Image (cartoon, rainbow, N blue to C red):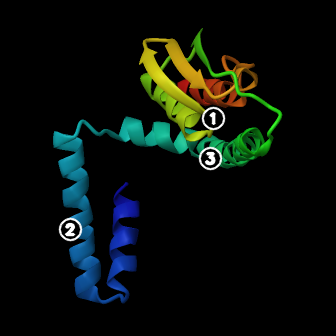
Amino acid sequence: MVLLLFALWLIFNGKITLEIVLFGVVLSLAVYWFCWKFLDYSPKQELYALRILPQGIGYFFVLIVEIIKANCGVIRLIVSPKYETEPVLVTFRTDLKTDLARTVLANSITLTPGTITVELTEDEFKVHCLDKEMAEGLCDSIFVRLLRNMEKTAGK
């Protein structure tokens, strides 16, 4: 995190001088100390984030693809005059262990057009789907599988 803060400092300054480098080092260390002391941040969390970073980037691209596919499906529902939507409220449980993974799943479902997470309690999700076809396979979607793998990787 210190290196990232320092790199951002250099990028935002636009030039490199001795004063800017020294002040950037001091400022980066001060911000890191503040986060460690008052925001419950630790190097252990940094290692966790670094461990799952490649999978997180892959997850982001899968999310983008799923959003595009869901957009096409919702457009098809709207434009098609012969197809009537059947909205449904689905409840399902997941075996994701961390609050972070469950929150990411809930947000991913909400970001995907045609579905919205209505409630998340412990490991139970309530999701409103624009059509019953969108509800199929929700409990074992690509999001759940990727998040499960991320949890396994982080646990090692």
Secondary structure at badge 2 equals helix
Secondary structure at badge 1 equals loop
Question: Split into 4 quadrants, where in the image is the C terminus?
Answer: top right
**x and y percentages locating residue 120 in the rendered image:** 44, 18
Asked if residue 86 is positioned above or below residue 56 in the image, the reply reads above
Name the side, left or right, on which 56 lies relative to 38.
right
**x and y percentages locating residue 152 in the rendered image:** 61, 24
Asked if residue 111 is positioned above or below residue 8 in the image, the reply reads above
Distance in Å between CA atoms under marks 1 and 2:
48 Å
Q: Earlier in the sequence, mark 3 or mark 1?
A: 3
Residue at (43, 12) in percent of width and height: 122
| Residue tagged 1 | 114
Q: Earlier in the sequence, mark 1 or mark 2?
A: 2
| Residue tagged 2 | 26
Q: Nearer the viewer, residue 111 or 152?
A: 111
| Residue tagged 3 | 60
Secondary structure at badge 3 equals helix
Q: Nearer the viewer, residue 72 or 8?
A: 72
Question: Badge 3: how crowded within 10 Å, few (<14), some, or many (20+)?
Answer: few
